[in-house]
Amino acid sequence: MTIIAKGTEVSGALIIDGNIRIDGGIRGDITATDGVEVGKTGVVVGTTIQSKTAIIHGRVEGHLIAPQHITLGGKAKLLGDIKTGNLVIEEGAIFHGNSTMMKEEQPKGKE
């Protein structure tokens, strides 16, 4: 797991093999093979955040694409569009954008 700690600021596109947890700040796009988690102190400003799953407790500005599921915690602020298979928005979360539900892609031969 890759961790961007509180107080750390990163600028530029990130490509992660596995999971990433963000408690600091990122200005740029994120692509993770597994999951993205933005903690309560985390801030992400980018065009696109892509992963299998996403759990947001902090602030995200950008489009969020996660075929399996997205959870917006009670303190989350998401300014951007969502594309996912399952969506959970907890009471208190702020979401400004559009949501599109999608089917998770099946591996070839499993249809």
Image: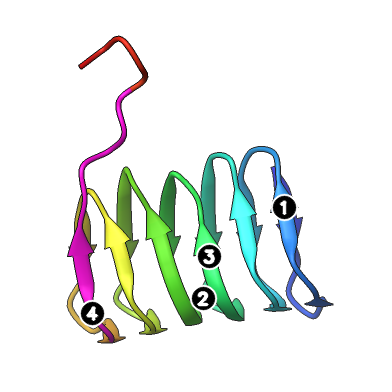
Residue range in magenta is: 97-106
Alpha-carbon distance for marks 1 and 3?
Answer: 10 Å
Measured from the top left, where is residue 42 in percent x and y? Answer: 60, 76
- Along the viewing direction, whichever of 66 and 9 lies nearer the viewer: 66
Residue 105 sits in quarter: top left
Label 1 element class: strand
For the residue marked with disc 1, what is the amino acid?
Ile
Residue 46 sits in quarter: bottom right
| Residue 48's disc number | none
Label located before the other in sequence (4 or 1)? 1
For the residue marked with disc 3, what is the amino acid?
Ile
Label 4 element class: loop
Q: Which residue was labeled with disc 2?
A: 40
Residue at the spot 29% in from the left edge and 76% down from the top edge? 74
Q: In this rendering, which labeled residue sits more in front, label 2 or label 3?
A: 3
For the N terminus, the image quarter is top right
Q: Is residue 24 left or right of residue 111?
A: right
| Residue 98's disc number | 4
Q: In this rendering, which labeled residue sits more in front, label 4 or label 2?
A: 4
Alpha-carbon distance for marks 4 and 1?
Answer: 25 Å
Whether the residues at callouts 2 and 1 have beta carbons within 8 Å, the answer is: no
For the residue marked with disc 4, what is the amino acid?
Asn
| Residue 49's disc number | 3
Measured from the top left, where is residue 79 in percent x and y? Answer: 39, 87
Label located before the other in sequence (1 or 3)? 1
Label located before the other in sequence (2 or 1)? 1
Q: Which residue was labeled with disc 1?
A: 15
